[in-house]
């Protein structure tokens, strides 16, 4: 029972008017609250240990841990464990003695690689092809996604998406076979069209000057639709109110693309660019090897094909591992450098 009669009237701090003893009744509860035992000053709160917390988390979320364990096991078995065998690059590997029993030779394999007259050509061909591929494959999906986002005809938009997305599911071997047939000097559609215009047939795959163009633009045709899906997902996350405000202010379609859409997908574009630069040296081996012949070796011989020929065909596993390790280190340095520059310029990157 609250002592209402003890404090018949008081002035409300909110309205400034006399009010029955509500405030005093509230204050009169203080002794009752004081009866609740308070924690002693300086008392240490005991928390469960990390092992107990992990055990409780496992019991509560074991389904999620089980789901994550499959990709985690994949990376451990097929990615991290094989990395330990990079030690072959510093040994004179013998299949009989194994990776750990072979003779240690230090940096001899790298010295042999760098002193090889072919190394300069391999590095130049790989960098030029990778840089050309990055310049072509980065803006095309971005422009395709922006164009598809502006299409209001649903049927036409879905048709274009299907036509551009479908080549991604075609095997690389099939794509190369189609390319060889289309560019054949005798039966290729391209040379037949040139012949109808009075131009002599061109051996595109036999001329080293055309190799990079064929490799890059067939790759763009195959992957542009798939990469555009990522940008379309980012465009769908832009607030429609921004476009409505721009329309009210009189902005044209190009102005809305430049001032609303591009800033909205810039973080995604930066991440894609960083990943693309990080994979510059890891360009596809299959397509380069399948398009390669004795006539275009001057530009088609790159580091991945050289590793295949050296390691598997010539059975020089130590040299092939040294070349692959050098390639991976260059990729890592490019990834770190571009991520640092991207964070400095745009504030976005793969990690903080």
Image: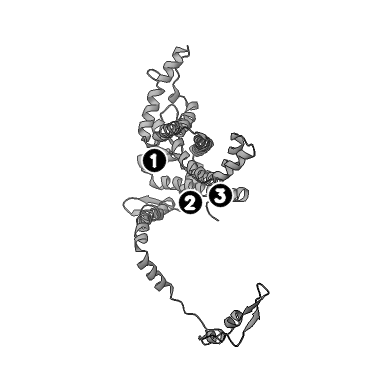
- Mark 1 to mark 3: distance in Å? 30 Å
Q: Which residue is mark 1?
A: 308
Using the image, determine if residue 347 lies above or below residue 184. below
Residue 59 shows which numbered tag? none
- Mark 2 to mark 3: distance in Å? 30 Å
Q: Are marks 2 and 1 in contact (CB under 8 Å)?
A: no
Q: Nearer the viewer, mark 2 or mark 1?
A: 1
Residues 148 and 171: in front is 148
Tag 1 secondary structure: helix
Residues 192 and 86: in front is 192
Nearer-N-terminus badge (1/3): 1
Q: Which residue is mark 3?
A: 339
Other residues around mark 1 within 10 Å, as few (<14) / some (14–19) / many (≥20): some
Residue drawn at x 59%, y 34% as measured from the top left: 253
* Residue 237 pos. (x, y %): 51, 46
Residues 21 and 244: in front is 21
Tag 3 secondary structure: helix
Other residues around mark 2 within 10 Å, as few (<14) / some (14–19) / many (≥20): few
Using the image, determine if residue 209 lies above or below residue 31. above
Using the image, determine if residue 79 lies above or below residue 60. above
For the view shown, which residue lies furthest in the left direction? 96
* Residue 258 pos. (x, y %): 60, 38
* Residue 289 pos. (x, y %): 40, 34
Q: Nearer the viewer, mark 1 or mark 3?
A: 3
- Can residue 230 be seen at all in this image of the molecule? yes
Residue drawn at x 36%, y 58% as measured from the top left: 69
């Amino acid at each position: 029972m609250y002592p209402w009669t003890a404090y018949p009237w008081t002035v409300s701090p909110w309205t400034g008017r006399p009010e029955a003893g509500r405030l005093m009744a509230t204050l009169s509860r203080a002794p009752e609250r004081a009866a609740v035992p308070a924690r002693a000053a300086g008392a240490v709160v005991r928390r469960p240990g990390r092992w107990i917390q992990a055990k409780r988390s496992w019991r509560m979320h074991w389904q999620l841990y089980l789901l994550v364990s499959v990709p985690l096991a994949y990376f451990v078995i097929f990615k991290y464990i094989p990395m330990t065998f990079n030690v072959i690059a510093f040994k004179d590997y013998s299949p009989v003695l194994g990776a750990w029993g072979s003779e240690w030779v230090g940096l001899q394999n790298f010295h042999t690689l760098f002193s090889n007259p072919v190394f300069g050509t391999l590095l130049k061909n790989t960098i030029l092809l990778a840089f050309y591929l990055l310049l072509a494959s980065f803006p095309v999906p971005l422009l395709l996604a922006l164009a598809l986002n502006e299409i209001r005809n649903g049927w036409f938009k879905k048709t274009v998406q299907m036509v551009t997305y479908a080549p991604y599911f075609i095997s690389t071997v099939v794509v190369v076979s189609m390319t060889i047939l289309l560019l054949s000097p005798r039966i290729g559609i391209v040379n037949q069209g040139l012949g109808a215009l009075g131009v002599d047939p061109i051996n595109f795959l036999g001329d080293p000057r055309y190799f990079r163009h064929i490799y890059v633009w067939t790759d763009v045709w195959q992957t542009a639709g798939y990469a555009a899906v990522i940008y379309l997902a980012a465009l769908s996350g832009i607030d429609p109110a921004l476009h409505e405000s721009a329309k009210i202010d009189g902005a044209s379609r190009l102005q809305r693309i430049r001032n609303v859409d591009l800033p909205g997908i810039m973080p995604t574009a930066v991440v894609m660019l960083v990943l693309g630069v990080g994979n510059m040296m890891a360009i596809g081996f299959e397509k380069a090897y399948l398009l390669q012949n004795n006539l275009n070796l001057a530009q088609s011989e790159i580091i991945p094909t050289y590793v295949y020929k050296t390691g598997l065909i010539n059975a020089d596993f130590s040299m092939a591992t040294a070349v692959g390790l050098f390639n991976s280190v260059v990729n890592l340095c490019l990834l770190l450098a571009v991520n640092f520059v991207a964070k400095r310029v745009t504030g976005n990157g793969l990690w903080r």
